[in-house]
Amino acid sequence: MAAVVALVLGGAGGFAGGFYGLGGGVTGAETQDLRDRVAELEGQVTDLEEELAAGEGVDDASSDDASTGDAGGSPVLIGVPAGWQESVAATHVWVQVLEELGYAVELMEIPDVGALYMALAAGEVDMTLGTWGADSQDYIDQNGADLEDLGSWFDEARMGIVVNEDAPITSLAELADHADEFNGEIIGIEEGSGVVQGTDQGAVPAYGLDDFTVQTGSTQDMLRAVAEAIDSGENVAATLWSPHWALDELPVRFLEDPEAAFGEPAAIHAYGTAGFAADHPELAECLAEISLTPEQVNSMVNTVIGTGGQGDPSAAQEWLASNPDVTCAALG
């Protein structure tokens, strides 16, 4: 049984962090720093390969994290962007799919989005379930010649403002006229995050929300405040993004954004090294066939990741069992 090896290089990312500096470019110093990180990554991968060749570094007792079978000779090495919960959850689900197709799988957790795509371009990992946002697109564009787009598995990633499900409005265009019912407050997350910038620089001027105060703080504080307001029967408006477990766990919904103040919905793509589809045609076809709805992806994150942690393989099996339409022709 081939154990799934998780190589944790340290650090933590996350969606909110991934949106810091939304729309900005990458400086020469930052590019060199990423190259230095990939060089370090290459050294650690070499060490891992030597350990595996010597029969070290694999704990056969970790059968709960194991993938059986091998459809292509060598294990498929998936790069996992640390802290990006939707991609971590999707990776655990895809491990189950790959097992059923007969592949052995190894996971490599990489804390930096830029390093993830550079490692993919360098062939240090075979594929990733991807990230999204303007900063991610910059790294994808920079390494595009050495990447292969394996298709999108979710087409409605977005930022915006959510309200309690029974709130009296459905659109951001109505929010200004109902300021008193929301205490003139939008509960935000960390200052400088993309969703807070989108609120301050996009939604506030687009919808005349100058009388609102955009509160900033930690993401956990925001989620706690939303839950407490709902429990108390109060209206609440807060910044959020999808995918997110809270959209499955809490009775909240996005306000419509007719002015596209937060931008258009984005797609999350899986990427492989150049030539991946030719090397793994069955897997590439399966990836291309599966696309999730917002309800599916939010429930996936909630089931597999929940409010924290690194993901639970047994929960991924549970989620797949409850979503039998998430399948492809190769699975029968």
Image (cartoon, rainbow, N blue to C red):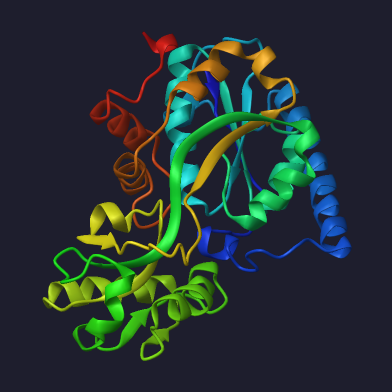
What is the x, y in percent for residue 114?
72, 51
In the image, 103: left or right of 307?
right
Q: Is residue 207 above or below residue 110?
A: below
The C terminus lies in which quarter of the figure? top left
| Residue sitting nearer the eye, 235 or 34 | 235
Residue 240: x and y in percent read 39, 65
Residue at horizontal 32 percent and vertical 72 percent from the top:
173
Residue in the foreground of this view, choosing between 304 and 138 = 138
Q: Residue at x 58, y 59 (%)?
A: 13
In front here: 199 or 307? 199
Q: Is residue 30 left or right of residue 188?
A: right
Examine the rendered structure and indicate whether residue 298 appears above or below residue 228: above
User: Left of 272 or right of it: where is 162?
Assistant: left
Q: Is residue 282 left or right of residue 260?
A: right
> Percent position (x, y) of residue 167?
17, 70
Rendering quarter of residue 249: bottom left
- Residue sitting farthest toward the left: 233
235, 299: nearer the viewer: 235
Q: How many marks do you count on the picture?
A: 0
Q: Is residue 10 visible?
A: no
Residue 285 sits above or below residue 273 on the image: above
Would residue 55 be seen by someone viewing this image from the given angle? yes
x and y percent of residue 17 in the render? 57, 65
